[in-house]
Image (spheres, rainbow, N blue to C red):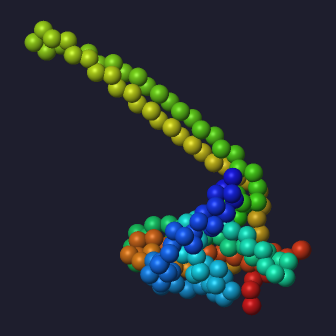
């Protein structure tokens, strides 16, 4: 389902990002070729987390997975945290794209009626509290892909990282 959603967004992206270029939406963009061609041509792929398989003319598939996290400060320690978190999220995106995802939802509803008496008049009020928790799980093994790009949101409050590679018939390799 996530794959279908990403494919849908990928199809809509050219219409939604008309007039928006990657350089207008992001800062400090560093993306290796040929991944830059696919990402910068569609800034929405750079903005929304997820994995995307792209079939190439030679029969291989390119995979690009993007993840993001908030920026706390400009310290070296926070930059390391950003890379670590995004790398794990990007690998999880690839796994989620290739494996089944288990989704569990729990809903708790509390109804409360409050009656108050003031000056001999009775007033009532009904309060409904709803708590919904959704958890997604995916498990499996995914090959480790190299980092192929990093960038920040225009205002610098979000960090983005892309991992990627080429998936051939029996091999995975980084672009040259």
Q: Residue furthest left?
A: 119
The total of numbered circles placed on residues is 0
Viewer-proximal residue among 173 and 64? 64
Instruction: Provide residue 141's location: percent of width, then percent of height.
Output: 77, 61
Q: Residue furthest right?
A: 170
Answer with the quarter of the image where residue 93 lies: bottom right
Residue at 64% over, 61% down: 8
Residue at 69% over, 59% down: 3
Residue at 75% over, 76% down: 62
Residue 63 visible in the shown view:
yes
Answer with the quarter of the image where residue 173 lies: bottom right
Vertical order, 52 against 116 (above or below)? below
Instruction: Provide residue 166's location: percent of width, then percent of height.
Output: 78, 78
Lateral position of residue 133 relative to residue 59, left or right: left
Residue 26 visible in the shown view:
no
Q: Quadrant of the C terminus?
A: bottom right
Vertical order, 108 against 68 (above or below)? above
Residue at 54% over, 75% down: 43
Q: Residue furthest bottom?
A: 176
Instruction: Provide residue 143's location: percent of width, then percent of height.
Output: 77, 69
Vertical order, 68 against 42 (above or below)? above
Instruction: Provide residue 97's location: percent of width, then percent of height.
Output: 72, 60
Lateral position of residue 119 relative to residue 66, left or right: left
Q: Residue furthest top?
A: 120
Viewer-proximal residue among 83 and 148? 148
Viewer-proximal residue among 47 and 81? 47
Lateral position of residue 145 relative to residue 119, left or right: right
């Amino acid at each position: 389902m996530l794959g279908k959603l990403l494919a849908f967004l990928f199809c809509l992206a050219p219409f939604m990002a008309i007039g928006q270029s990657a350089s207008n939406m992001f800062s400090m963009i560093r993306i290796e070729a040929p991944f830059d061609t696919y990402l910068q041509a569609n800034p929405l792929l750079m903005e929304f987390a997820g994995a995307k398989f792209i079939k190439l003319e030679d029969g291989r598939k390119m995979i690009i997975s993007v993840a993001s996290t908030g920026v706390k400060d400009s310290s070296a320690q926070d930059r390391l945290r950003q890379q670590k978190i995004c790398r794990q999220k990007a690998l999880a995106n690839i796994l989620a794209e290739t494996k089944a995802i288990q989704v569990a939802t729990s809903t708790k509803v509390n109804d409360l009626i409050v009656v108050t008496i003031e000056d001999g008049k009775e007033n009532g009020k009904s309060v409904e509290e709803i708590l919904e928790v959704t958890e997604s799980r995916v498990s499996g093994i995914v090959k480790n892909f190299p980092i192929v790009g990093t960038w920040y949101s225009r205002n610098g409050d979000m960090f983005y990282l892309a991992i990627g590679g080429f998936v051939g018939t029996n091999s995975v390799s980084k672009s040259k």
